[in-house]
Amino acid sequence: MDRLKVFFHDNCFDGTASAALFVDFYKQKINADVNVILQGMHHEAGDPFSSVTFCEGDNVCLDFRYTDAPQLTWWFDHHVSAFQPTTLKDHFDKNQNGQKFYDPTAQSCTKFEATMLAEKFGYDSDLFTEVIHWADLIDGAKFENAEAVVALKNPVYRLMTWVEQNQNKELSHRYINTLGTKTLEDIVKLPWINKPLESFLEKHERNIELIRQVTTYKDGVTFFDLSDQRITFHNKFIPYMLFPETRYAIGITCSKNKVKISIGANPWPTKQREHNIAQICERYGGGGHPMVGAISMSASDVEVARDIAKQVAQELSIAE
Ligand SMILES: [Mn+2]
């Protein structure tokens, strides 16, 4: 049987939605009986493709950086930092097969992908209208305000939290296969989502308290260092809720294998953003979007991470 391997940005509403939409497209337009293999991808220091295996059929990468691997037959991304090293952009330009698409101005990969697939291949994304709408809103951080996206009353925000925190690969794949078959409100009610979500939400409440205790605010920048807490994930809007005057938020977290500096611009700023966060992150081997990005390094480099975070805080500060 023919195979399709789908590499997607894992633990990301947009990344998983991009994967679900592509599988639907492929079955609708190319091969209804294809054997699909899903593979979540995470940003890391170095080449994240160095340890992956491609399949013998089509290989697609979604909402995740470019690779010059010859097995890659399809690609969609909107990350400003999609080409690392930047020489990969040359490879992308010179090796077009009409199935690789890039638009760093697109708000979400899902919507960009749906638009391109409709335009170039006559794909009908009707089943994914709701998914596309929310992926675009979530990736664009177009939430009504910080309180709402921290309070998580909206069932879609709860589902987003589940996607971001879920560490069970099988459930992640089951979720991708469920998207487009039910409304998001019905998906979040499924027991295999709802049950783990309860503990994710408890963790979320603890994180709010923890971040409240350790976050400092100075010259437009909030900063927290949770590298000694083993928190792999936190809602990135908590600092904006705590300090609405924040222009930029910087946080350090540490998991078993990596230490991560997260940098974001307040989506509800009182003073406009001037810096391109993706560019700042790229300077230190990280990447992202103009509004939000991250730098990851090995867990043993906590001191290096603290130094970098301090430098970035300095750069982003404004004299008030
Ligand atoms: Mn995205």
Image (spheres, rainbow, N blue to C red):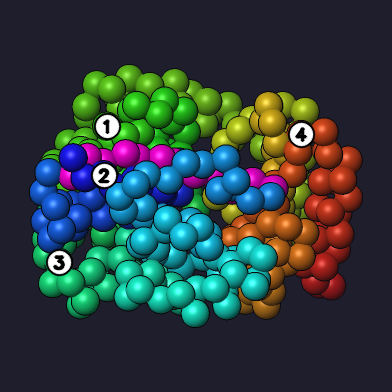
Q: Which residue is drawn at 69% across and 50% down?
A: 46
Q: Give the range drawn in magenta.
A: 34-45
Q: Is residue 262 above or below residue 78?
A: above
The label shown at residue 3 is 2
Sequence order check, earlier mark of 3 and 2: 2
Left or right: residue 308 versus residue 178 is: right
Tag 3's secondary structure? loop
Sequence order check, earlier mark of 3 and 1: 3
**Residue 113: image location, x then y, percent:** 30, 66
Whole-number angstrom distance, CA of label 4 to CA of label 2: 36 Å
Query: Which residue is identified by label 4?
Result: 299
Q: Which residue is drawn at 28% across and 36% down?
A: 175
Tag 4's secondary structure? helix
- Foreground mark, 2 or 1, reads 2
The label shown at residue 311 is none
Q: In this view, does 182 lie above or below 75?
A: above
The label shown at residue 174 is 1
What is the three-letter code of the residue carrying label 2? Arg
Query: Which residue is identified by label 3?
Result: 123
